[in-house]
Amino acid sequence: MDKLSDRVKRLGYSQTFVMSNKAREMKASGIDVISLTLGEPDFDVPDNIKQAAFDAINQNFSHYSPVPGFLELREAIAYKLKRDNSLEYKPTQICVSNGAKQAILNVLAAIINDGDEVLLPAPYWVSYDEMVKMMGGTSVMLPTSYVTDFKITAEQLEEAITDKTKAILFSSPCNPSGGYYTYDELQSLAKVIAKYPYITVISDEIYEFINYETKTKSIAQFPEVYEQTAVINGMSKAFAMTGWRIGYSACPEWLAKACEKVQGQMTSGANTMAQRASITALKTDPSEYKYMIDAFEKRRNLVYELIKEIPGFKVVLPKAAFYFFPDISHYIGKTLDGTLINDADDFAMFLLENAHVGCVGGVSFGSPECIRFSYAASEDELREAMRRIKELLEKF
């Protein structure tokens, strides 16, 4: 008898961590690798947030919190959602989790039965498909390309819905494409979804503040789908708090209670000191942390000018988040210096081994013709990385 479950055997490893670990191994062996693999801000946590964590320790916030999080934090999240998104949520509709990833898993665990379908506009974050598998569901991919700015249409969504469809899961702003859905685009999707009240929308808005054009809109703002929508967000990206592991969901009451039930049997409440620090972060005016977004925008503009010069890359200017997602289909099916490139994962490994630049292939993002670069790195590293790739590919 096999000791491992069929469920865990169906899961794959995160390609993001596969490539970042490979880059670390090469660095450890003495190779000068520039890793642009992980989606992690390279800033330190702002001082006022760190001080709030120190204060929480000194005030002995070292005991279990309520499963859905401290009431004060849930009130701060409700305040933030009203201030930044014009969304009305009560603290009882909010569940604070160990990162946004757990918040998504809570929702999926609460709604998915074996065989239920979850629509995933591609490209999508690498964990979405694996999360659906973990909960016994089936992912249905909705393909896009750089030509459509990696966004689906309302017509495409309508065609994909069946009586097995239980949810649609997407991020806006999007990891990995760096695009986002406008008000009008979200409204057109909401009109379709409202026809199917059995469908839950899981709207991952973790990159909300890293938008270089406008204030990010949420699909939950449309009354016709408010009771169908779970808004997912967290502290990792806007506040550089990736290791603090605080995320949250804001849902209709029926779903919020289900998420609390799921989390109560898995992890209970999130880290108490990080929760207290998150109250300070959320109550601070977002302009206090804008210096990080300004730096990302400067790096984006730098990389865009450099990446356009790389032969065989088709790229659009990302409007949000901190990723480039170029189409490299020019190289698929070709043999480069003895290496057959079957898909973007092969190409990413080729770049790592030959240019010593780490990126992530698009297969696990649902776009096997693209690769993802994070530009959450220094300008010097970004310049050198693009130079190495250009120099390598000019040979072919």
Image: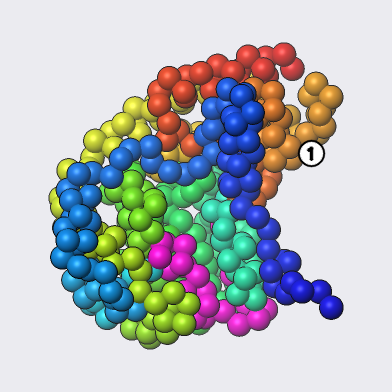
Bounds of the magenta span?
98-122
The answer to whether residue 349 is left or right of residue 122 is: right
Q: Position of residue 293 (x, y in %)?
A: 30, 38
Decide whether residue 96 is among the magenta residues.
Answer: no
Camera-side residue: 67 or 214?
Answer: 67
Task: Please report the residue visible at 65 percent of the width from the left and 81 percent of the height from the top.
Answer: 114
Determine which quarter of the picture holds residue 218: bottom left
Task: Please report the residue visible at 64 percent of the width from the left and 51 percent of the height from the top.
Answer: 364
Camera-side residue: 310 or 346?
Answer: 346
Q: Which residue is mark 1?
A: 342
Q: Is residue 92 above or below residue 11?
A: below
Dot 1: what SS?
loop
Camera-side residue: 377 or 230?
Answer: 377
Decide whether residue 111 is among the magenta residues.
Answer: yes
Task: Please report the residue visible at 38 percent of the width from the left and 59 percent of the height from the top.
Answer: 245
Q: Is residue 2 above or below residue 392?
A: below
Q: Is residue 119 above or below residue 149?
A: below
Q: How is the image coloured?
A: rainbow
Q: Is residue 241 visible?
A: yes
Quadrant where the C terminus sits is top right
Quadrant where the N terminus sits is bottom right
